[in-house]
Amino acid sequence: MNSLNQIDIKISKKDVQNMGSLPSLREKKRYILLSVKSEKKLKRKDLVRSIWNCGISMVGDVGIAETGLWVMDFNGDYLLVRCNHTSVEEIKGILASLTNVSGDKIRLDILGVSGTINKLKKRFIQQEEK
């Protein structure tokens, strides 16, 4: 009697082709570009902390972890955020509800959402500069 360790499985190329492609476990990402308007100059650290605190208060620790939220870049005028493709609307809601950072009033306007950073830059940043 053969044990599981001794079973010899042979798979031909034809069998592999008939199986099709396996689904990827990597999650699809979306990038959200926002314009930031504030009374004073904001520090990146304070803005990130406020976004996380707002997200945790709205969807909880587990919920915010499942969104894959990550602040990619902040230069004072623009904010670039990454999240999972299934949680874009949730992240938009979180960012829209953020009204102050360290006691200073701010306004975040969503400029657009894309699957790549380059498309966001081409579509929205270059259009605003014209």
Image (tube, grey):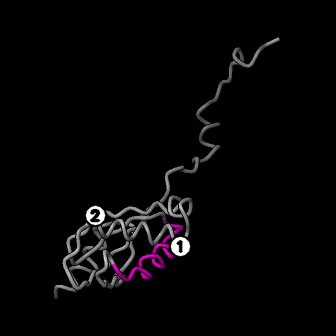
Residue range highlighted in magenta: 85-100
Q: Is residue 124 left or right of residue 82?
A: left
Q: Is residue 126 left or right of residue 91?
A: left
What amino acid is labelled 2 in the image?
Lys
Give whichever of discs 1 and 2 has the lower sequence position.
2
**What x and y, as percent, mark residue 115?**
39, 67
Looking at the picture, tell me which residue is in the foreground, 30 or 108. Answer: 108
> Marks 1 and 2, Cα distance to the nearest angstrom?
20 Å
- The residue located at (38%, 83%) in the rendering is 99
- The residue located at (29%, 73%) in the rendering is 79
Q: Is residue 119 above or below residue 126?
A: above
Looking at the picture, tell me which residue is in the foreground, 100 or 70. Answer: 100
Label 1, residues with CA under 10 Å away: few <14, some 14-19, many ≥20: some
Q: Which residue is label 2 attached to?
A: 45
Q: Is residue 26 above or below residue 68?
A: above
Looking at the picture, tell me which residue is in the foreground, 37 or 49. Answer: 49
Q: Is residue 50 left or right of residue 126?
A: right
Mark 2 residue element: helix
Q: Is residue 94 in the magenta section?
A: yes
Most extreme residue toward the bottom is 130
What amino acid is labelled 1 in the image?
Met
Q: Is residue 97 in the magenta section?
A: yes
Label 2, residues with CA under 10 Å away: few <14, some 14-19, many ≥20: few
Task: Indicate which disc residue 58 carries.
Answer: 1
Looking at the picture, tell me which residue is in the foreground, 75 or 97. Answer: 97
**What x and y, as percent, mark residue 15?**
65, 36
Contact check, label 1 and label 2, Cβ < 8 Å: no
**What x and y, as percent, mark residue 1?**
83, 11
